[in-house]
Image: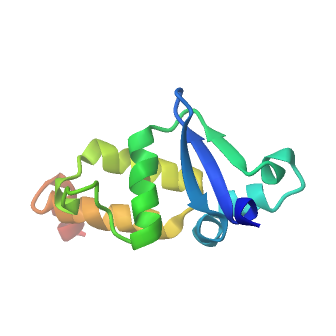
Amino acid sequence: ARHRSQLIITVGSEAQPLKVHRDLICFYSHFFRAALRSPFKKSLDGKVHLPDDPVEVLELFMRWLYTQKLTNGECEPRNLSRTLLFDLYVFADKCDIPQLQNKVVDLVMEKSGAGIIGKEITRI
């Protein structure tokens, strides 16, 4: 039953494997819930391949999935690059993970401080 509780996601052109608990990823992602609970082969072999997604994005997603925090190893959330955060937001949008999208938006807003985004919002 162990193989049924885990999912292997292969990421990027190198197909780096990442293991995740099925129930956890299905709880947060409508995309994975639909893919894994459908009668298609994808749901039967326990693997999903995401060749267009950067490994760094999936690693950050996995950390968030298990901790609900956006950290990159030892890196503080405020030190994550905007590019990585935007890529993570696009991934969360593609996989229909609204809680992660909200977390990314909150962090981008926090990082912006008095930046353009912050100024636009305060004017509204």
Side (left or right) of 72 relative to 76 = right
| Residue at the image point whose x is 83% and y is 52% from the top | 44
| Residue at the image point whose x is 66% and y is 71% from the top | 23
Q: Position of residue 87 (x, y in %)?
A: 40, 44
Image position of 18 with respect to 112: above or below = above
Q: How many marks?
A: 0
Viewer-side residue, 111 vs 71: 71
Q: Is residue 120 visible from the viewing direction of this image?
A: no
Q: Position of residue 19 (x, y in %)?
A: 57, 53
Side (left or right) of 19 relative to 33 = left
Hey, which quadrant is residue 15 in on the image? top right
Quadrant (top left, top right, bottom left, bottom right) of the C terminus: bottom left
| Residue at the image point whose x is 69% and y is 66% from the top | 5
Quadrant (top left, top right, bottom left, bottom right) of the N terminus: bottom right
Viewer-side residue, 92 vs 3: 3
| Residue at the image point whose x is 66% and y is 55% from the top | 7
Viewer-side residue, 109 vs 17: 17
Side (left or right) of 49 relative to 65 = right
